[in-house]
Amino acid sequence: MTPTPPTTPTEDALRPHTYDGIREYDKRLPNWWLFTLYATIVFWVGYWSYYEWFHAGPTGPQRVELAMARIEADRLAATPTLDEASLWKMSRNAVFVEAGKATFTSTCVACHLASLRGKDENPTAIGPNLTDQKWIHGGQPTQLYDTVTKGVLAKGMPPWGPVLGPKKITEVVAYILSHHQEGEPIVLVPAEPPPPAPQ
Amino acid sequence: MSDQKITIEFNDKVVRQFLLASVIWGAVGMLVGVLIAAQLNFWQLNFNTPWLTWGRLRPLHTNAVIFALVGNMMFAGVYYSTQRLVKARLASDFLSAVHFWGWQLIIVAAAITLPLGFTRGKEYAELIWPINIAVTLIWVVFAVNFFWTLARRREPSLYVAIWFYIATIITVAMLYIVNHLSIPTSFTHSYPVFGGVQDALVQWWYGHNAVAFFLTTPILGIMYYFLPKAAERPVYSYRLSVIHFWSLVFVYIWAGPHHLLNTALPGWLQTLGMTFSLMLWAPSWGGMLNGLLTLRGAWGRLRTDPVLKFFAAAVTFYGMSTFEGPLLSIKAVNALAHYTDWIIGHVHVGTLGWNGFMAAGMTYWLLPRLWNKPLHSTALANLHFWLGTSGILLYVAAMWTSGITQGLMLNATTDNGTVLAYPNFLDTLNTIRFMMLMRVVGGGLYLSGWFLMGYNIWRTIRHASAVNGTIEVFADEPAPAAEDKITLVGTFLNPPVLFSILGVAFACAWMFGGNFTSIAGLTGLMLCVVLAGAHFEARGGKWADWYDRLLVNTAPFTILTFLAVVAGGMIQIIPTVIAHHAANVEDRRQIPYTPLELAGRDLYVREGCYLCHSQMIRTLVPDVLRYGDYSRLGESIYDHPFQWGSKRNGPDLARVGGKYPNIWHLRHFENPRSISVGSNMPNYPWLLANPLDATTLPAKLSVQRTLGVPYPNWTPEQISTRVNEQARAIAQDLRTAGAYIAPDKEVIALIAYLQTLGHSEIVAPIHAAGL
């Protein structure tokens, strides 16, 4: 048999075989390692049983639809009752206007430009001027609120309601209104003929 | 038996060739990695050049480090150790040379085609079909050379390293062939035969197990040879080798779906992916333990020996990475980490730490032996180690911070959880810019260490003469004793194999059977475990004897390994392919693309858009708030290849169709920053200049029809008319918006494709089954 290396205690028997000079001990598997293995196997049995056998937990789609339904309810409950007067009032409030400006800068300037003047400043811009007295979808504060919330898909304005939420939209509307005066004339201009819908 | 001895000379030439190739290609692959990392901070670094753009270079980076760095390193290590472990020269010098030069040609072909935009659009499986065939053939050459050498071995018993090599060769062949099944439309283009959810499942069965059987098992084999050699210590535990080898190769295969958690992948597959990933933790750590504990008694030498330093660190990184893997596979953790830099960090612990350091340690150990000259500078090798280690730590810490930060920001909500706290994706991107920069620095440090190794190699071998190892053997070795032979029946008719097969069968009956079958299956499984345990307690010696006999029988060993790796894939893939195709999709079904949109989609694949943009809105509230209703399985059912993506450097695009006007997209391709301030997406000016090649469409549509996409049998003229009509409409719309662009440009097709994303038809009442 093989001589035991001097540094090794006698209990550590080497396997008889040598491969290109490589020897092997045959030590016990560490207990903590075995328990880790067993624990994960038990977890597999339990987790599979819970979700896939007894269907005791919700599936991914069920979970997200339930959560979205709750969010929808919360949103409906939290929708502010807005009227023209209160939005005008907000537009004179520096806190509202500053918060609205921050949202406008990160979300709206791509199309309406930082000056809010859109196509009137640069004809290749996507969005119309928001500082003049001409309005395509209505210039009353609540109409602005609706336009931002629901968007105008055909013209490339996304519905911002689900993304920004009522609070941020209110602030953005206040920011836009801060460029206007209450009582100034509102000229409704028809939209340009809509371009052919993308196929 | 005569006592006459002969000396055989090993084929170490091919080892030297593969070793040097690994170091050289590794430098190239990592250089590309540092470049694309820098491009995420400095978008200008593509210089408005198509072939220098992120989406085309990222596949080059991943393929180069996987198949060129690790591939060549693996072949060097396998060939060096196998010859010595079985006491035989490689069976064929010719096959060895074909293997080496063929593999290098494949790498060169990849390095040319990928930047040119020739791709299959599937991660780590991007190479086009002619190269796929070449890879398969060269892999067969490798297999023949290897098994032929085993057949001529003078050492009857197979050492643990050889087990891992066998598992590598057969499993990579299986994975590679199935995931590359495609139908060509031209010499440079093909569509994968699987589409949508099937393609996703097959892709990640492959992708995950490429990590397992290309980056892990061969390197574990190499560890089992080189680490005890360098440490001059016996391997810690043979029985741990046995248990962790078989559990690793069996469990690994099942875990692929953890790349698709919370997606439209059917729930049972996600559950399998998560639970098997957790069960993979202990088998993986078995390898780490055997590596680290083998070093007991040699730790003192770590101070002086760079080889042991590299090995000890590599095995530690392996342990970190294989702990992190199961952690990231927990659905809740995955909801935060998936699509973020955390995953990139996780991968690089494995590749830089485990693969790169094993390669470095092996190289420094082999150099003096292959060139018969001491290493030029141990100090430089030590410096390499510290540069590499600090590089990895910087890289990984940056990616953890970056991934968790961005994940938390993307998932954060406000106003009582009803709206996103950071609705603009760019806010989250620009928060992690510093971390992305630190990644470049970390990667750069690691690469500079690699260059030091290159210099050290050059100085070592410059005036050295190559030597081949030799060994003295008896002229005629005794054949293995007849009683040790295992027949085909004997391969299966023995307690360990029977208990294993029964156990897996019962487990499947439990998981997939109806109520009664499930109960019977679970009872059977428990009974099987108890009986196997009792039998092992009573007759464990016989199990060990049988295993000793198995180790002198290559074919039965290989058959059993194949059975172990084939089970998980078959159980996941076959039901998915049967159950989930267009005809029995529920809820929503994708509307097939128009010819122009299909052409645009091929451009999307060509530019590698899927590498930064997912098309998969997960069943998670933040995803739904940000991108819209969660993606249904049917909505990508006709997508060959699927484009669900694995990383979001930019926002998800699954429902981008119709969200913005055409002009938005045109401006955005021309210069993303004109629309999205702070974006790091490169400019794509060539899309606006290049004319669309629509001549390939008839062949492409014909293949799509073969694959089951319901296109009418249009003539080439009809296709061309459709393309022109749609392209003109888009160009007309762009003109109305103030942009003049000819309808035949590539960008028109790409816009057409983007504008249709998310369009589907309802095929059944939503959730008819009820919630």
Image: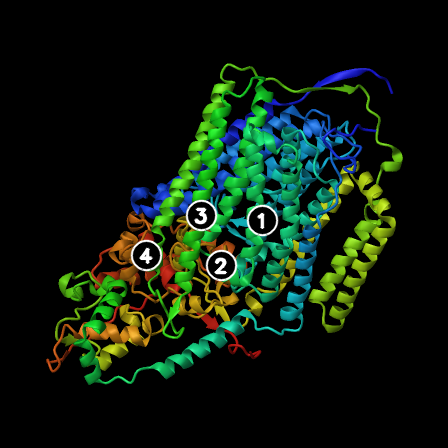
- Where is residue B408, by image quadrant? bottom left
Badge 4 sits on which subunit? B
Question: Could you say whether the residue bearing mark 3 is in a helix, strand or loop?
Answer: helix
Q: Position of residue B156 (x, y in %)?
A: 79, 31
The mark found on residue B667 in the picture is none
Q: Earlier in the sequence, mark 2 or mark 1?
A: 1
Can you name the residue that lies furthest to the left here?
A184
Badge 1 sits on which subunit? B
Q: Which residue, given by chain and number where applicable, does mark 4 sit on?
A: B748
Q: Position of residue B24 (x, y in %)?
A: 48, 30
Count residues near mark 3 (Cα–Cα under 10 Å), then give few for <14, some for 14-19, many for 20+: some
Question: Could you say whether the residue bearing mark 1 is in a helix, strand or loop?
Answer: helix
Q: Which residue, given by chain and number where applicable, does mark 2 sit on?
A: B639
Number of numbered markers: 4
Q: Quadrant of the N terminus of chain B?
A: top right
* Cα separation between marks 4 and 1: 45 Å
**Same chain check for tags 4 and 3:** yes
Q: Are marks 4 and 3 in contact (CB under 8 Å)?
A: no
Q: Which residue, given by chain and number where applicable, does mark 1 sit on?
A: B322
From what the image shows, is residue B461 above or below residue B425? above
Q: Residue at x 56, y 30 (%)?
A: B307
**Same chain check for tags 3 and 1:** yes
Question: Could you say whether the residue bearing mark 4 is in a helix, strand or loop?
Answer: helix
Q: For this rendering, which residue is in front, B373 or B211?
A: B373
Count residues near mark 4 (Cα–Cα under 10 Å), then give few for <14, some for 14-19, many for 20+: many
Q: Which residue, given by chain and number where applicable, does mark 3 sit on?
A: B397
Q: What amino acid type is highlighted by mark number 4?
A: Ile
